[in-house]
């Protein structure tokens, strides 16, 4: 099963960023604002997150 790494924005903790496990952060201008928060299996994530990562290599998620 596919796994995804979660990064949380320290300035806006309600925003999460998912990427494929081990892919690291995409080329973001504010890369230092994101901290690794763990890895999740595909079946624990909303289908929209999985589809977003498949299409764009990353997906944002409202963590509230």
Image (tube, rainbow, N blue to C red):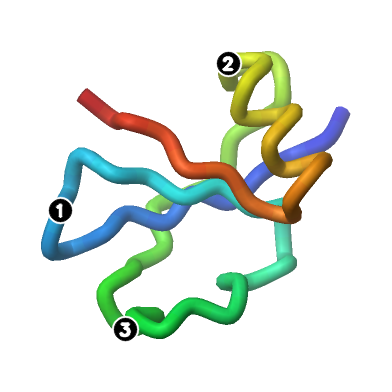
**32, above or below 53, in the image:** below
Say which residue label 1 marks.
12
Relative image position of residue 42 (x, y in whole percent): 72, 25
Seen at 64% across and 52% down, the residue is 58
For the N terminus, the image quarter is top right
Point out the residue furthest to the left here.
Answer: 11
Q: Does residue 56 appear to the left or right of 35 in the view shown?
A: right
Residues under labels 1 and 2: Cα distance? 20 Å
Left or right: where does residue 51 sit relative to residue 31? right
Where disc 2 sits, the SS reads: loop
Residue under label 3: 32
Q: Is residue 52 left or right of residue 8?
A: right
Quadrant for the C terminus, please.
Answer: top left
Mark 2 or mark 3: name the one nearer the start of the chain.
Answer: 3
* 28 vs 44, nearest the viewer: 28
Quadrant in which residue 23 is drawn: bottom right
Give the residue drawn at x 71%, y 29%: 50
**Residue 10 image-quadrant placement:** bottom left
Compared to residue 40, the image places residue 22 above or below, namely: below
User: Helix, strand, or loop for circle 3?
Assistant: helix
* First of labels 1, 2 by sequence position: 1
Under tag 1, what secondary structure? loop
> Mark 1 vs mark 3: which is more N-terminal?
1
Q: Nearer the viewer, residue 36 or 32?
A: 32
Vertical arrangement, residue 43 with respect to residue 58, above or below: above
Label 2–label 3 contact, CB within 8 A? no
The image shows residue 11, relative to residue 40, as above or below, that is: below
Which residue appears at 26% of the width and 59% of the height?
A: 9
**Residue at 63%, 21% in the rendered image:** 48
- Residue 46 numbered tag: 2
Mark 1 touches mark 2? (CB < 8 Å):
no
Badge 3: how crowded within 10 Å, few (<14), some, or many (20+)? few
């Amino acid at each position: 099963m596919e796994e995804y790494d979660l990064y949380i924005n320290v300035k806006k903790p309600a925003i999460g960023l998912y990427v494929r496990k081990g892919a690291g952060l995409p080329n973001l201008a504010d890369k230092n604002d994101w901290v690794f928060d763990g890895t999740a299996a595909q079946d624990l994530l909303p289908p929209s997150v999985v589809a977003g990562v498949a299409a764009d290599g990353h997906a944002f998620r409202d963590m509230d």
